[in-house]
Amino acid sequence: MASRFAGRRLSVVRLSIVLAIAALLVQGALLSWGKVKDAAQAEQTHSWFGPYVDATSTPFYPIGDGVAAGERVVLAFAVADPEKPCRPSWGGYYSMDEAAGTFDLDRRVARVHEAGASVVVSTGGLINEEPAVACEDPAQLVTAYADLLERYDSSTLDLDIEGPALENPAASARRVQAVRELQGRFSAAGKPLEVWLTLPVATGGLTAAGLAEVERYVAGGVDLAGVNLMTMNFGETRSAGQSMAAASIQAARSAHQQLKELYGSHGEEWGEMSLWSKIGLTPMLGQNDLMGEIFTLQDARDLNAFALEVGVGRVSLWSANRDFDCGPNYPDPTRVSNNCSGVPQGQGEFSSLLAQNIEKVAPPPAAAPSGGLQAAQSAPAATAIVDNPETSPYPIWEEEAAYVEAERVVWRGNVYEAKWWTQGDAPDAPVAAAAETPWTLVGPVLPGDKPEKPVTAPKGLYPNWSPKRAYSKGDRVLFEGRVLEAKWWNTAESPEAALRSAANTPWRVLANDQVKALVVAFKKSSGS
């Protein structure tokens, strides 16, 4: 063999070139494999769209309207009760029970679930105190979070940490401990708890306090689904003439790099695509809190295109309550409103643009009928729904009765709320457009529902009923402490039947909300 290659020597230069090429090939293969692995990991994460709903803002938002299977609704904000720090409340105004009674929150949530959608519970916000800030008892804090998730059948917790709460490391430590314990409980039950950390952001990325907050969760063993960036109110960090979408994209790219370095420092290496799947974007619609910052419909299109390009894990907006045109009667669109965006738009247009092509998680398939194919093809016979006064939270609708705005009734297993004065209009009557019906569907009658405890009226609010007097339609009387209104002319017909929820009676019992308002006005006028 040696004689065939006599005089030839191995060139060091050639060997170096060969080794360099081999190294490049190996590096390229590793990079390619890394990209494949990164893409596969990102593919396992389902992106989702879910608007924030300000639960306590009036008029109360109909969260079940128009929601589709696979979508999410982010309910905000659950905070510490001002009087009982370890008890959660909505906005500091309503306990969970009070929210169920005052604006039917449980019923509205049930309607979301009926549609195959899900609810995200969001705690904190800029105003009031996030539960971990006020509640210093670790066990009670875990219970507070758990009660919220259980009450609204939610497996996603959104922690909106901003303002003073972001500068409170002690509260942060309590929160991390509580969330870690909750995730352990959920995991043991076979139902993982998805946790999102929502933080303010500038065009340069997360603030130092925001990064420190993320650091505590990562170091504390919390499995974060992602960090949701509040792409709004950029202030001086936004360049002159820079659109809100461009500022949001710059902020997102900056935060992406920050999170890559943060996770890397803890030995967690995330690829480009898989890390984007752990980032959410939440703009504030229209007029932001800072003068001159206006998130337009074009900004929504541009931000949606970016979200699809990089594959963010989540897109939200603040808020669904504001996804409306302010109309001609709103004098100053530069003044932030809780009920409209301040820019010309169609109803829900921002939501439609931001949600465009964002993946929806499909609901689980329905179980096949036991009777096989033939059973599936045979429609069940229709069964009339008969409302039971004993299990109805509000009076059952009557054709002869008149109802005023905000009055609620039960009809065929559902609760409806009157949008304006109405009489004779069945709540479930088919209409071509929602604007044509005087009723809003609130949600279903729930298991365990019972009639409201009646509000009694003081003496002198109306005359006592008398069997010797004739009553015309609209006349009101007191009977056994209740206020009743005549549905038609009658005489000597006792209101007692109406109190027993009889249908064919000339009397209608006024709803609690109406009686409360009448009592307040009566006390003011009488000086009591």
Image (cartoon, grey):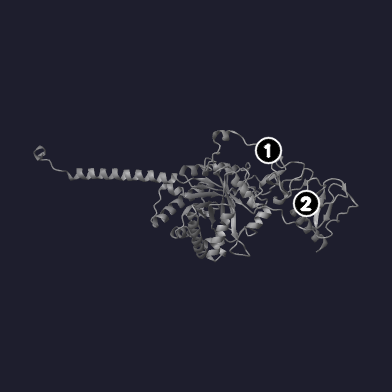
Of the 4 image quadrants, the one containing the C terminus is bottom right
SS label for mark 2: loop
SS label for mark 1: loop
| Mark 2 residue crowding within 10 angstroms, few (<14) / some (14–19) / many (20+) | few
- The first of marks 2 and 1 along the sequence is 1
Reading the image, the residue beneath label 1 is 433
Residue drawn at x 74%, y 54% as measured from the top left? 513
Q: Say whether residue 515 is left or right of residue 341.
A: right
Query: Which dot marks residue 523?
Result: none
Of the 4 image quadrants, the one containing the N terminus is top left
Can you name the residue that lies furthest to the right here? 468
**Count of numbered circles on the image:** 2
Q: Are marks 2 and 1 in contact (CB under 8 Å)?
A: no
Asked if residue 298 can be seen in this view, the reply is no
Amino acid tagged 2: Arg
Residue 398 pos. (x, y %): 76, 44
Can you name the residue that lies furthest to the left here? 3
Between residues 246 and 490, which one lies in front from this camera angle? 490
Residue 183 pos. (x, y %): 49, 56
Q: CA distance from mark 2 to mark 1?
A: 36 Å
Residue 130 pos. (x, y %): 57, 60
Can you name the residue that lies furthest to the front here? 371
| Mark 1 residue crowding within 10 angstroms, few (<14) / some (14–19) / many (20+) | few
Asked if residue 219 can be seen in this view, the reply is yes
Amino acid tagged 1: Ala
Give the number of the mark in front: 2 or 1.
2
Reading the image, the residue beneath label 2 is 500
Between residues 76 and 399, which one lies in front from this camera angle? 399
